[in-house]
Image (tube, rainbow, N blue to C red):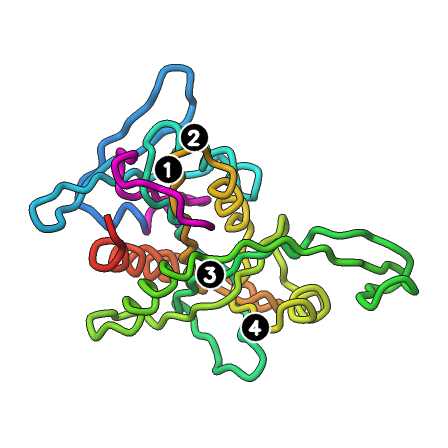
Amino acid sequence: MKEDRTLSGYDYSVALITATDTETFGAKALYPSWKEVQFDGDPQTYFVSSFERGHTCCPVVLAQQSEMGMTAAAVLSMKLFQRFRPRYIISVGIAAGIASIGDDEQFYGDVVVADMIWNYVTGKFVGPQESDIRFGTVGFIPRPAAIRLEPMLKKYVQSAAESAENQCHVRIGPMACGSMVVANQEILDKQVHSQFPDTVGLDMESYAVAYAVEHAVHPRPAALVIKGVSDYANGEKSDEYQKFAAYTSAQFAKFLYERFLPL
């Protein structure tokens, strides 16, 4: 994500993108009032609000994908770029936790911020003898594609995470993204940890948002993925902590862009 932007080219400070009703509910809790906005010929509903930094009014837009997954995330990201020209686009919501090897245990509600987003499902299915990754009679040769967070943005995230005012437990690390929900330890070990053992989270949209930014026209926004751990990718699946994880994700995102990110 290379820095090639000018501040004068942006109309909105932040665009928040979500994939589910629960994630949108968590993001809407950030501000007391949102104004609904629609455009002729566009079935998408957008919500706009604002916050103050100093004496400046900073507009924010929120939009939810029509369905989960990378295709819908890429399409909506491009719409947000075209309609609102945001300085930042932030994917907020929930993700599956993946405690990295040798790391402390992850807890529900922990915030995961991606410093690298990689697509773990790209590759080639082959015979079991043709690859080190095997699932029964099927082998898989991975060809992961990765996009890294700008180093300067990572410094702002680290500053926010280490701030005495931050109330969230934040983990910064690689985020795996794929087109399916994972609830199987074997897939986690063979297809995720075998490629990037330090991966700390897994979702279904993040890579598409980062990819859309990589291919956006000027003025290009910056992409951030901030997700709350709602369950785990090892079979311990539950909806019990989704609202809490969506809440912590949105709250840390707000803390980051209102206090630390250059606007």
Q: Earlier in the sequence, mark 1 or mark 2?
A: 1
Residue that extends furthest to the top in the rendered view of this protein: 40
Give the label on residue 79, or none: 2
* Tag 3–tag 2 contact (CB < 8 Å): no
Vertical relation: 260 (above or below) 106: above
Q: Which badge, 4 or 3, comes first in the chain's sequence?
A: 3
Q: Amino acid at mark 1?
A: Ala
The CA span between labels 4 and 3 is 11 Å
Between 105 and 154, the one lying in front of the other is: 154
Question: Start and end of the magenta stretch?
Answer: 1-26
**Circle 4: element type:** loop
* Dots 1, 2 in contact, CB < 8 A: yes
From the viewer's perspective, tell me whether residue 71 is left or right of residue 156.
right
* Labels 1 and 3: the sequence-earlier one: 1
**Outermost residue to the left:** 55
- Amino acid tagged 2: Lys
The image quadrant of residue 137 is bottom right
- The alpha-carbon separation of the residues under discs 4 and 2 comes to 33 Å
Task: Determine the secondary structure under disc 3.
Answer: strand
Q: Nearer the viewer, mark 1 or mark 3?
A: 3
